[in-house]
Image: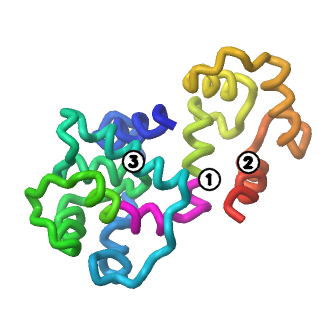
Amino acid sequence: MGGWVEKEMRASEGGGASSSAPPPSSCLGALLASGKVGASAPTRRALSSEELAEVDQAFFLFDADGAGSVDARELQVALRALGCERARARDVRALMASFGHPPHAALDLHAFRDLVSPVVAARDATEEIARAFRWMDADAKGSLDVRDLRRIAAELGDTTTTEEELQAMISEFDLDGDGSVQPKEFFQIMSLAYE
């Protein structure tokens, strides 16, 4: 997971691959306009333990100086890493204001959770699955194979999974028998996790 957050962070800072597609509208701007965030917003769904751990991981990753707080710029980059790729500075300031924080405030973990949780709760499962596939398909070939799983295992520090076990994983989810996992197959598998 850390590799994914760091990759998204580099992409949000301009170090990722460029795209010729027009940028999507700000997910944060849309959330702010909907009234689903802010101190007076209606109750939102609680984050799962995995989502809460992801929020905490982002906080500690972007609290680079270890001061126990993040500023507006660090919050903006964290929001991008957590899936709101087009978080704009003005939207981050509006988000902070909606919770009563001035734009120059240092946010502790509790305040960070309050601000970021509605964004994480509103993420689209389909886009999450697509993002996971793109991350796993590092060479953008349009499918996942043993090489992808080997790379991911190495990033996670797994040195015990054998080549046969990696191949068995591919075979289990390779519904059309072509030796790799296509996006449609990946979506079918991962959709079960969101049910």
Vertical arrangement, residue 4 with respect to residue 41, above or below: above
Q: Nearer the viewer, mark 3 or mark 2?
A: 3
- 38 left or right of 7 in image: left
The residue lying at 34 percent from left, 59 percent from top is 113
Type of colouring? rainbow
- 159 left or right of 93 in image: right
What amino acid type should be assigned to the residue bearing mark 3? Asp
Q: Local crowd at mark 3 within 10 Å, few (<14), some, or many (≥20)?
A: some
- 102 left or right of 78 in image: left
In magenta stretch: residue 26: no
Q: How many marks?
A: 3
Q: Residue 56: which numbered mark, if any?
A: 3
Q: Nearer the viewer, residue 125 or 23?
A: 125
Q: Which residue is mark 2?
A: 186
Q: Are marks 3 and 1 in contact (CB under 8 Å)?
A: no
**Disc 3 versus disc 2: distance between alpha carbons?**
27 Å
Q: Which residue is mark 1?
A: 129
Q: Earlier in the sequence, mark 3 or mark 2?
A: 3
Vertical arrangement, residue 136 with respect to residue 49, above or below: above
State whether the magenta stretch is mostly helix, strand or loop.
helix
Say which element carries label 2. Answer: helix
What amino acid type should be assigned to the residue bearing mark 2? Phe
The residue lying at 66 percent from left, 15 percent from top is 159
Q: Are marks 1 and 2 in contact (CB under 8 Å)?
A: yes
